[in-house]
Image (cartoon, rainbow, N blue to C red):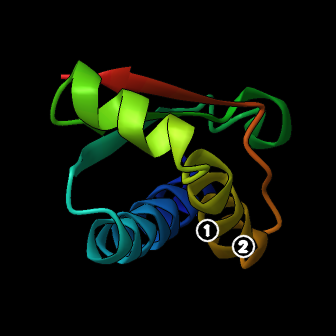
Amino acid sequence: MTKTEKRLDNTLRKILTTACENIKDAQPEFSHLTHTINLKKPDSTLQVTCFFIDELALAQASSQQQLPFIERELIEQLRVVGLKPQTINFLAV
């Protein structure tokens, strides 16, 4: 891993941690998020997966139109490093 890739990886982790904490503040049933990325092609490989505590919490967030809020939060935070996730998935733990 090059220094540039390492810096991007560290920055990305901090940004996603901030986004996760912001989402948890707004959505108590939100559990955590993970991401995958190829640091050699970050613009086209970032995928974020968001987890809720159970299926009911996911269904409620979906019915209350909270998923677009989560997507916007992630996109806003990632804009700092000029990245946009290729996919954002929502699952239950």
Q: In this view, does 24 lie to the left or right of 49?
A: left
Q: Where is residue 66 in the image (x, y as percent from the top left)?
A: 54, 54
For the residue marked with disc 1, what is the amino acid? Answer: Glu
Identity of the residue drawn at 53% across and 61% down: 3
Residue at disc 1, secondary structure: helix
Identity of the residue drawn at 72% across and 61% down: 75
Q: Is residue 3 left or right of residue 21?
A: right
Tell me the number on the disc at residue 33. none
Instruction: Give the distance between the C-alpha atoms of the residues marked 1 and 2, in whole angstroms.
Output: 5 Å
Q: In this view, does 71 lie above or below 39?
A: below
| Image quadrant where residue 81 sits | bottom right
Q: Is residue 31 above or below residue 37?
A: below
**Mark 1 and mark 2 residues within 8 Å of each other at the beta carbon:** yes
Q: Position of residue 80 (x, y in %)?
A: 72, 79
Q: Which of 27 and 64 is in front in this view?
A: 64
Q: In this view, does 58 lie to the left or right of 71?
A: left
According to the picture, the residue beneath numbered tag 1 turns out to be 73
Residue at disc 2, secondary structure: helix
Residue 1 in view: no
**Quadrant of the frame with the C terminus:** top left
Q: Which of 26 and 80 is in front in this view?
A: 26
For the residue marked with disc 2, what is the amino acid? Answer: Glu
According to the picture, the residue beneath numbered tag 2 turns out to be 76
Q: Where is residue 46 in the image (x, y as percent from the top left)?
A: 66, 35
Q: Which of 25 and 60 is in front in this view?
A: 60
Q: Residues within 10 Å of mark 2 (few under 14, many from 20)?
A: some
Identity of the residue drawn at 47% across and 28% down: 90
Residue 66 in view: yes
